[in-house]
Image: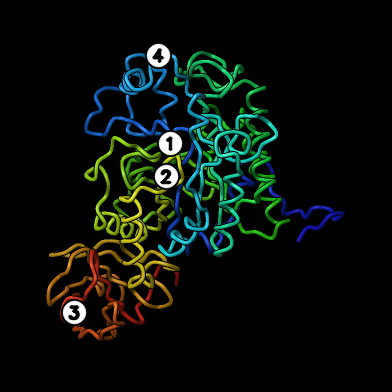
Amino acid sequence: MYTCGDSRPMSDYQPTWKSLDSHEIPDWFHDAKLGIFIHWGVYSVPAWAPSEAEIDGEDASPYAEWYPCYMYEEGSPTQEYHHRQYGDDVEYADFIDDFTAADWNPDEWADLFADVGANYVVLTGEHHDGFPLWETHYTKHNAAERGPERDLVGDLSDAVRDRDLRFAASYHANLNYYQPGYEGRFGHPDFQGGEIGDEDAGPGPEYVDFMNAKHRELIRKYEPDLLWFDVPMADADHLNAKDLIADYYNTAEDWGKEVVVNDRASVDAVGPTIEIEEGDDGEFHGDFVTPEYTSFDEVREEKWEACRGIGNSFGYNRAESEDDHLTSEQLVHSFVDIVSKNGNLLLNVGPKADGTIPEVQRDRLMALGDWLEVNGNAIFGTRPWVIAEDGDTVEVRYTHRDGDLFAIALEWPGDHLSLSVPTHVDLSGPPEAALLTPEGEITVDATLTGKELSLALPERPSTDHAYTVRLSDVENPRTE
């Protein structure tokens, strides 16, 4: 490891994509599978966006964390709501003092996330509203000096790491559409070329320096296990993003940490687009691709991470009903599908301004944790198999680990499950098979007939949502 006074080794990362793209993803990120995303900030006070079903036209979004953008958009549903609810004279910055975190207990959050089975936590260090959740030198408008008057990033980092989870604070200031201290919807006086969203709009050099100074401070203070950028408003060279990533990779070696960086540091990335064309690998830089609210049809060769809320919004949205949230079964099925295709799930919670997690979100998290308590061996530490999907009468997803193939049926198949395993690998005979249940593994009779593997299942176990059979000693050509 590099120590103070040493000359840096020749393997140091340089601020070029060729050098940065040589970075290897550590095993911990492949193994982790489940992370918790937390969108929490001043926008959690108004906590409103139209529900997805109510959106008509471009001047709306189901994302409540975009409130400070749309409240200044003429004629938008958010602006209409704001004027009805608060009047014409209330600015976004007026909500800061009501962002109290009065009932927040970071240890309770960390216990919940650990109990669910998450392996890393990403808190919004600074969202697009220009309000850092840590004590920063660069603006008085931050959570340590206003609102909660505490270092939210530091307090959660300590609690999460005390439970051996990895931690990061995401950074969205590449596209600040609001900055406290300035009127209207503007990120900084040095935002040039018109309104945000205009083709020629972008940050000037003063804005870039301001943005990167805060980000480097965030990295220096909390030594994050990953960098989670959001969508930039300019290319990587303009934002000096490659310099920051190279410094981060090199500094992480000094810390003795294996780290990862997402693909959103450059507009060259695939990840910021919510929909990705199947088969279109595009060009991306970073360790993993980050689609939102979507999955893929097949196993992806590159590592990826799906991010989504339990509801239609990342930030807490008081307008959402129970029907706007994933059911427990939908959440489990989505998670299994993502993992089978070489993905992680970064599952978002949107706490209220007081720091409490809405009951519907807590309920879904606990349901996922209950399922993982029985089926976690088929998820954590696994790698994708030859194919991800199978099944005629019920849908099946595959994962593989340490010589075992896991077949996860998304519905209970009854007394028989037929799999196409021998079509993809040579079997000398039927493998040993066992059904994962809350009471432990139950042996399953397996019959090999040509290219069909037939499993005679016992009585349905006392579990819900998806059902796992472990097949012993089945090779994985992807890793052999």
Q: For this rendering, which residue is in front, 265 or 105?
A: 105
- What residue did someone put label 3 on? 455
Q: For this rendering, which residue is in front, 466 or 23?
A: 466
Q: Amino acid at mark 3?
A: Leu
User: Closer to the N terminus: mark 2 or mark 4?
Assistant: 4
Q: Are marks 2 and 4 in contact (CB under 8 Å)?
A: no
Q: Amino acid at mark 4?
A: Asp
Residue 472, x across and y down, in percent? 34, 81
Q: Residues within 10 Å of mark 4 (few under 14, many from 20)?
A: few
User: Closer to the N terminus: mark 3 or mark 4?
Assistant: 4
User: Closer to the N terminus: mark 1 or mark 2?
Assistant: 1
SS under mark 4: loop
Q: Residues within 10 Å of mark 2 (few under 14, many from 20)?
A: many
User: Closer to the N terminus: mark 3 or mark 1?
Assistant: 1
Give the label on residue 351, or none. 2
Give the left or right position of residue 143, taking residue 115 as reference.
right
Q: Amino acid at mark 2?
A: Pro
Which image quadrant: the N terminus? bottom right
- What residue did someone put label 4 on? 88
- Residue visible at 20% across and 62% down? 395
Q: Residues within 10 Å of mark 3 (few under 14, many from 20)?
A: many
Give the left or right position of residue 468, taking residue 166 as reference.
left
- What residue did someone put label 1 on? 44
Which image quadrant: the C terminus? bottom left
Q: Amino acid at mark 1?
A: Ser
Q: Is residue 180 visible?
A: yes
